[in-house]
Image (cartoon, helix red, strand yellow):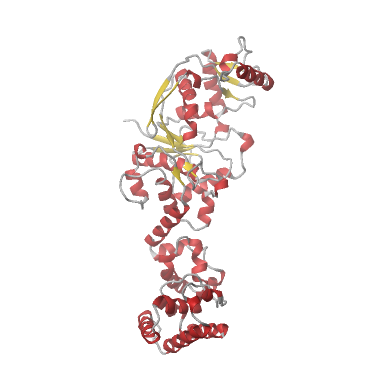
Amino acid sequence: MEIVRTRFAPSPTGFMHVGNVRSALFPWLLARQNNGKFILRIEDTDQARLVEGATSLIIDTLNWLGIDWDEGIIKGGEYGPYIQTERREIYLKWAQKLIDKGLAYADPYTSEEVEAFREQSKAAKKAFLYRDYRPENPPIWDGTKPLRFKVTEIKRYNWHDPVMGDLSAGPEALDDFILVKADGLPTYNFAHIVDDAEMKITHVIRGLEYIPSIPKYLSLYDALELERPVLACLPHILAPDGNKKLGKRDGAKSVQEYRDDGILPEAMLNFLASMGWNDGTEQEIFSREELITKFSLDRVQRSGARFDEKRLLWMNGQWIRKLSLDDLFERVKDFWPETAKQVNDDYKKQILALVQDRLKTLSELPILTSYFFEEPKPKQEMISDNKQLGKLTNEDVIKLLNSAKDVLLDCNYNAKSIQEKLNTLLETTGQKPGVLFSLIRIAVSWAPFSPALNETLSVIGRDKVQARLQLAIKTIK
């Protein structure tokens, strides 16, 4: 049986966004599912758009997500080099094959002449095709001019895309295109076909925007007498409103930014896999192993997948809750507030256990925990602006806090004992938990969120709870 060989071939032109990563994830899943090989290749022939450090960013992002590769940059392999600018001689060898067959020619025209041809086509009210203006006696190609492919079989092409179904295109989609630029570097249209052939790639998975170019690729496969790989195109990731392709203007961030914001790699992988794919069930949380087992190209939807950051945050919260406390503690080491450096790990683990169920991202840790490490500053508007507490008079608030202060003074400071005292306080004050407990929580933390009140008070300790309740009373007075 043929070994499945897939690849991810990014251009190092900037940060890795979610679309890039999904284009790596799907072929990686396919290779892992079939015990095949996944190759990482860098396509850097567009020298004008290169960004320094972008290749390192690609490697770092894939490593963080656990998308490992079997061959390619850093790891090497028998079909290298895996950086296109290091493969010039290989492309020239394949270009010469086309020249020898009479299927490639030196392009003698200037940009002004090409523009004139466009105007002629426009005047004739027909689509511009370069092949209509092909030179009759082109010069011998010496590398100083672009080398163009000479399409000779003008026919309809049919192909099957495992995602998009049966597709076809007529002669109007075929044209002479540049193989090698005047700078000696190949175009994407030529280089990726050569690379895929040399690296024995069986499945090419990329974005939907490549469909219009596929007929040109098919004509080149035929000219080079190459067997076509499986060609699959993924639907676009759409902006949150679902009306257009996701872009920077829609708030799209780099995957690196999501990592810095405290998104887990498991959640990001799960989220991107489920954008445009499902296994036919209601399941939403998939482990890496489950994705590898269940993934299939024929279950990728044809329509675009809307980018929903709220769903990513929900999914991240689910994954945070699945982690063991020790694992989570290791992952949050760079997210603690500055004041947490002053306390020991046991105390921090105790606090982390309290807030684990409330975290949606690791970056929320300071907001949820800072009052455990430092004295919070009172913000009386947190009481007055609260829908329920705002109905109370200052006298009501002071009376409730004094009652809480008295009851919590005479208490064994463990979670069970504190809860018993809080329940007694509910009976004696006649207040609802949503009012009384919210008031106490705000008075001791001045934070928008906190874990279970009894556990929070137990960790803060009697002396600090008493002092904070007294300060709250003083502030309101």
- Residue 364 visible in rendering: yes
Q: Between residues 403 and 142, which one lies in front from this camera angle?
A: 403
- Relative image position of residue 147 (x, y in whole percent): 59, 20
Write the residue at 47% across / 52% down: 309
Instruction: Point out the image quarter for the C terminus.
Output: bottom right
- Relative image position of residue 293 (x, y in whole percent): 32, 44
Q: Quadrant of residue 471?
A: bottom right
Instruction: Point out the image quarter for the N terminus.
Output: top left
Question: Is 184 situated left or right of 58 in this image?
Answer: right
Write the residue at 49% across / 74% down: 344
Q: Between residues 294 and 53, which one lies in front from this camera angle?
A: 294
Question: Is 250 situated left or right of 34 in this image?
Answer: right
- Relative image position of residue 172 (x, y in whole percent): 50, 19
Q: Between residues 234 and 327, which one lies in front from this camera angle?
A: 234
214 to 248, vertically: above or below: above
- Residue 144 visible in rendering: no
